[in-house]
Amino acid sequence: MGEAVGSMLASAVGIAISPPALVAVVLMLAAPRGRTIGLAFAAGWAAGLAAVVAVVVAAGSALGPGGGRPAWPYWLELALGVLFVLMTWKQWRDRPRAGHVTAPPRWMREVGRFSAGRSAGLAAALVTAGPKNLALAVGGAASIAASTAGVGGRVVAAALMVLIGSLCTLLPLVVHLLRGDRSARTLGEWKAWLATHSTAITTTVLAVIGAEYVGDAITGLA
């Protein structure tokens, strides 16, 4: 089980570092029905991530041979690593220039008025249709499927991946539930910091994980 957990850890952390999702939850919690739609958003994120991980782990486990680690996960890692490098370049090229303020997307300006169902749907779309999160979910789940862990170990590793990858939506909720009205200042500071540094955070995550994926793939295929 240790191999399965260790192999997916970087991917899970990469998913968890998702500034748009955390900002969305913070904005929802400031709305009149904030706790309801915030919980729905977190549930939709976890459900969407769990669906991707479950499908890839099941399909990858069916592809794997009886013993040892197959070669296909390394080729997948190589492809995803190259994709992350290209995404890093695009993210850096499209970064906001000094003196220019980038308007937030329309959905982010309206999340406080979302229904619970729409909040859950948005979260599921962000984690399953966003290139960064989807690629990381596939890569992490594939590494679980290709590990030598038994069925039980893979299930535990998959559950941990979903939990870790959902921290971006769970942490604001925990702070809100524990601190109540006093959480507004803390969450507001998180939102302001992320709004300022979102591009730098995402670019760094993509670069680091892309390098790790390519390095692991080259080592495994050599």
Image (cartoon, rainbow, N blue to C red):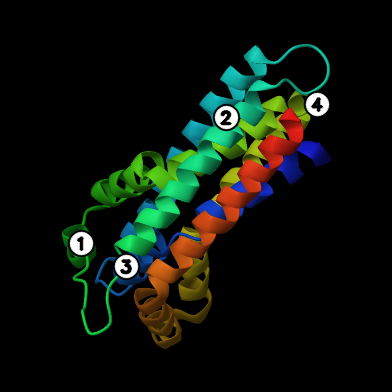
Point out which mark residue 148 bears.
Answer: 4
Instruction: Kindly identify which residue carries mark 2.
Output: 76
Tell me the kind of residue under disc 4.
Answer: Thr
Q: Residue at x 39, y 83 (%)?
A: 184
Residue designated by label 3: 95
In this rendering, would 151 be left or right of 102?
A: right
Contact between marks 1 and 4 (CB within 8 A): the answer is no
Crowding near pointer 4: few (<14 within 10 Å), some, many (20+)? many
Label of residue 217 in the image: none
Name the element at disc 3: loop
User: Residue 160, percent across and down?
Assistant: 66, 45
- Mark sitting earlier along the chain (4/2): 2
Q: Earlier in the sequence, mark 2 or mark 1?
A: 2
Q: Nearer the viewer, mark 3 or mark 1?
A: 3
Q: Are marks 3 and 1 in contact (CB under 8 Å)?
A: no
Residue type at mark 3 is Arg
Residue 69, position as x, y percentages in the image: 77, 23
Decide which of 42, 80 is in the foreground and name it.
80
Mark 1 lies on a secondary structure that is loop
Give the mark nearer the N terminus: 3 vs 4: 3
Which residue is outermost to the front? Answer: 222
Q: CA distance from mark 2 to mark 3?
A: 28 Å
The C terminus: image quadrant: top right
Instruction: Provide the residue designation for mark 1.
Output: 105
